[in-house]
Amino acid sequence: MPSIICWGASGHAKVVAQTLRRIGRWRLEGFIDDRSPERRGEAFCGAQVLGGREALAAARARGIEEMLLAFGDNAARLGLWRDLEPQGWRFPVLLDPTAVVADDAEIGPGSYVAAGAIVQPGVRIGAQVIVNSGAIVEHDSRIADGVHIAPGACLAGHVEVGGGSWIGAGSVVRDRLRIGAGVVIGIGSLVLRDMPDGVVAYGHPARVVREASR
């Protein structure tokens, strides 16, 4: 059984660890927390916090080559992946056993499809994407790198979502729309028109309210 570590030791990491336990394919060796060095050695989700970035060298020395980025910040997740992948770290696709994923769906490295999520035929999902609990990505949609589709969100058919965007929990996106890159769609929104890059939008129907923070 190969070993794996998770970068992140908070709420989303708990969800990822649960999926890892359900699958039983990897031995979870521990978690990286680069923000709270005092947590090193702390028990967490059946393993322990190994430390911050400095713990990676020891992990590699023990033969660990696979990692999951188990936190929700889209920009940080993409940046870290682009930093670590050239160093030889591998980022497997993680599919919860309770998710329903079409046979022809394409899912990029490090992406996670959580419990109860549905990914339909013809879908293309990039790298480091989170399709969170109970979310639905309908047929022929295109999801770029680093997107987070939050719990219970629904994307109808032929929807395109640009890199690093966040689709809030319980939101619904009408078919054949394009959500730009770096967009934040607020919780429970109804999206009935295209959204340009780099905006925050919410409501029924969703309207642009401001530019997204950089």
Image: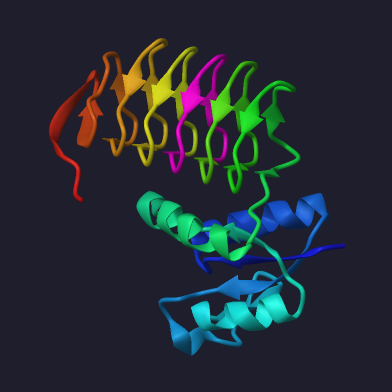
Residue drawn at x 35%, y 38% is 165
Viewer-nearest residue: 106 or 188: 106
Point out residue 207 in the picture as x, y percentages from the top left corner: 18, 24
- Quadrant in the picture for the N terminus: bottom right
* Residue at (70, 21) in percent of width and height: 104
Is 101 inside the magenta-drawn segment?
no
- Which residue is rendered at x = 42% and y = 31% of the image? 170
| Extent of the magenta region | 132-149
- Is the stretch drawn in magenta largely helix, strand or loop? loop
The residue under the point 51% across, 85% down is: 39
Residue 162, percent across and down? Answer: 37, 31
Looking at the image, residue 181 lies above or below residue 3: above
Front residue of 124/23: it is 124
Furthest residue in direction front, as rendered? 86
Which corner quadrant of the image does residue 21 belong to? bottom right
Q: Is there any visible trace of residue 195 in the rendered image?
A: yes
